[in-house]
Amino acid sequence: MRVLVTGAAGFIGSHLCEFLLDQGCDVVGMDNFITGSPDNMAGFAARPGFTFALRNVTEYIAVDGPLDCVMHLASPASPRDYLELPIQTLKVGALGTHNALGLAKAKGARFLLASTSEVYGDPLVHPQREDYWGNVNPIGPRGVYDEAKRFAEAITMAYHRFHGLSTRIVRIFNCFGPRMRLNDGRAIPTFVTQALTGAPLTIFGDGSQTRSFQYVSDLIDGMWRLMQSNVTEPVNIGNPQEMTLLELAERIVALAGTKNEIVYRPLPQDDPRVRQPDITRARTLLGWEPRVTTDVGLRLTIDWYRKRLGG
């Protein structure tokens, strides 16, 4: 099997490439390093079966030879990134997805879109099921990411219905693990970096907003199962174990063995109050559910960050 992975140098994309190589696939990685890093690919870049193309998927893309699958992960994914790169975020969700779909169609390949729980916005339904249409502010600062992914889902389904393309849509809930950047801006890398450097842990709002966190290996397993399935409707992949951000911060401090002050800052606009996946569809159709507990995943992540920080 020969697979193209866009966003191959990103946190999730690099783990996916490594997994696919372990499965015996030939992998073509594609990235422009706008938020990804060559360091993420260092462990497998020289492996047989892996090739890399430095490309911006919002422009015309081509790959020589056959492709069996196109897995489209390219996009800024951290609020910090898509607030700093709003136009690029919209373009990769729209033009990038269009280009990736066109390539899959030309090659007769399956297509998997990495979508996000952000399509649910600040949800009025809890937990979130795939048939919930969401509560999104299209003109708010987060709208550039939310609407880019919602458009990406719409055009993916249009290619499926109009062109008969074999498509898959995975709605990814909060994911964490090694290779997340120290300055990523999301909760776990921020809390872990602050804990290990002795800085105060910064919580936006009062910390009562909830999230659910899955370890990266569970996500990759879910994406692989979905790609091999015949499921064309969106599927939530996430950990249904919900916790507040204050609980997360306290858990990270305890696991890191540090003593840090917690400070509070104003809540950003349109920050979701709750986020928890209903994974009935993944359990029923894919036989998938998370296996790595939050504490085990956090220990692995803290150990990786400690090495990166020289501790």
Image: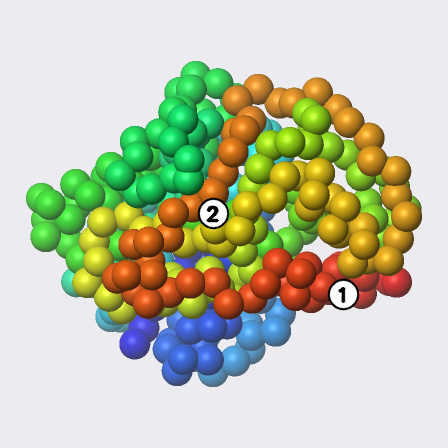
Residue matched to label 1: 303
**Horizontal relation, residue 94 to residue 140: left or right:** left
Is 205 above or below relative to 97?
above
**Horizontal relation, residue 144 to residue 83: left or right:** left
Q: Nearer the viewer, residue 158 or 190?
A: 190
Q: Are marks 1 and 2 in contact (CB under 8 Å)?
A: no
Disc 1 or 2, which lies upstream in sequence? 2
Number of callouts: 2
Residue matched to label 2: 173
Q: For the residue marked with disc 2, what is the amino acid?
A: Phe
Residue 227 lies, in percent from the top left, at: 29, 64
**Horizontal relation, residue 113 to residue 10: left or right:** left
Quadrant (top left, top right, bottom left, bottom right) of the N terminus? bottom left
Q: Which mark is residue 195?
A: none
Q: Nearer the viewer, residue 264 or 166?
A: 264
Residue 138 lies, in percent from the top left, at: 40, 20
Does residue 223 show up?
Answer: yes
Instruction: Categorize mark 1 by other alpha carbons within 10 Å: few (<14), some (14-19), many (20+).
Output: some
Residue 143 lies, in percent from the top left, at: 45, 25
Image point (33%, 42%), residue name: 129
Image point (70%, 43%), residue name: 247
Q: For the residue marked with disc 1, what is the amino acid?
A: Asp
Instruction: Categorize mark 2 by other alpha carbons within 10 Å: few (<14), some (14-19), many (20+).
Output: many
Image point (48%, 51%), residue name: 240
Res 118 → quadrant: top left
Residue 219 lies, in percent from the top left, at: 46, 60
Q: Secondary structure at mark 1?
A: helix
Res 110 → quadrant: bottom left
Spatial CA distance of label 1 from label 2 is 23 Å
Image point (74%, 51%), residue name: 251
Is 62 above or below relative to 91?
below
